[in-house]
Structure formats: structure tokens, C-alpha cells
Image (spheres, rainbow, N blue to C red):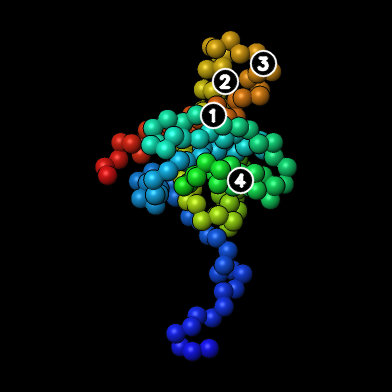
Amino acid sequence: MTTSESPPATDAQAAPRGVTVGDAAAFAALLPPGRLIGIDAGTKTLGLALSDVTRSIASALETIRRTKFKDDVRRLLDIAEQHAVQGFVLGLPANLDGSEGPRAQATRAFARNLNAVTPLPILLWDERLTTLEAERMLIAADASRKRRADVIDKIAATLILQGALDRMRGLPR
């Protein structure tokens, strides 16, 4: 090997490594133009929402029934590739007083594990009360209990993503 050649990449070097941030401005600075996926990560499902390419509007996308992390992430990354997604907005379920309990810790672990398999950046977004807000919206729309159960997670993901999009739109460019 000459001095101009690099040593072969090890598995650790070759693995994608994303970054997780908690600040919308820092996240926006990492992003090329394109869509984002919002994620409401529950214990049984991943609710997903998708932004438009201008990052103005979030729309409910789908709900992934959780099985194994590997399978869940494979589906998530397939969807991200299909829609040319540039990053993820992951709802962080903080307690009302701002502290973090077991659900927030599990969400942070999900972000760390996702960072290990994709270079796409992740924004942790405060999702306090989004599921409650989604439930209220569905009740106001006279959705049946079954219908609410089927769509609540992707509606919550839509609220999470829309909040982040609104915040990023207000940032100086």
C-alpha cells in the first residue's frame, strides 16, 4: 500500500452513522432539499407522516405494526427511499413537567439504533399531548372507536411533523 492509498474500511467505518439533534435550526442546517418523515414511536406501532417537498405540509402516511427492530427499520427505510426522504422527525414523549420517563428513554434508544443504520439526520421533537390532540380531532370528526384506533398513530405523527415544519419555516435562512 502506498502512502496515498487509504486502508480498507472496517465494518465500523463503513456503517452509516446518522446524527440526532434536539434543535430545529441545527436539524435544518443538516438537510438538503426534500421530504421529511415524522414518526410517532409507540411500543406497538410506528405512526408515520410525510412532508411535501417544500416542507410546508405534513400528511398522514401509514402505521407500521412493530415486530423486530430490524424489520421495522427495513420498512421505514424502504418508505424513506421510495419518497426520497432527507431526514426524520421523531416525537419525544417528555412528561408534562419536561422530565423524561421510560417512554422518552425508549425513543432515544430507537433514535440511536436508527442512527447506526442510516446517515439520515433525526430531529427529536417534543410530542407532549399530540396523541391526545389527535384523539380529540378524530372524536370531533365523529370517527368510530375502531377507526380512531387504526389511524391515531399516523395522525399523531402528522401533528409532530407539522409542528417541526412550522418551526423550521420560521427560521432565518
Mark 4 highlights which residue? 78
Q: Are marks 1 and 4 in contact (CB under 8 Å)?
A: no
Distance, label 2 to label 3, CA atoms, is: 10 Å
Distance, label 2 to label 4, CA atoms, is: 28 Å
Where 125 falls versus 15 (above or below)?
above
Distance, label 1 to label 4, CA atoms, is: 17 Å
Mark 3 lies on a secondary structure that is helix
Q: What residue sits 63% from the left and 47% below the top? A: 73
Q: Are marks 4 and 3 in contact (CB under 8 Å)?
A: no
Q: Residues within 10 Å of mark 2 (few under 14, many from 20)?
A: many
First-in-chain label (1 vs 4): 1
Mark 1 highlights which residue? 60
Mark 2 lies on a secondary structure that is helix
Q: What's under tag 3, amino acid-wise?
A: Arg
Q: What's under tag 1, amino acid-wise?
A: Ala
Mark 2 highlights which residue? 135
Distance, label 2 to label 1, CA atoms, is: 14 Å
Q: Are marks 2 and 3 in contact (CB under 8 Å)?
A: no
Mark 3 highlights which residue? 145
Nearer the camera: disc 2 or disc 1: 1
Q: What's under tag 2, amino acid-wise?
A: Glu
Q: What residue sits 46% from the left and 47% below the top? A: 86
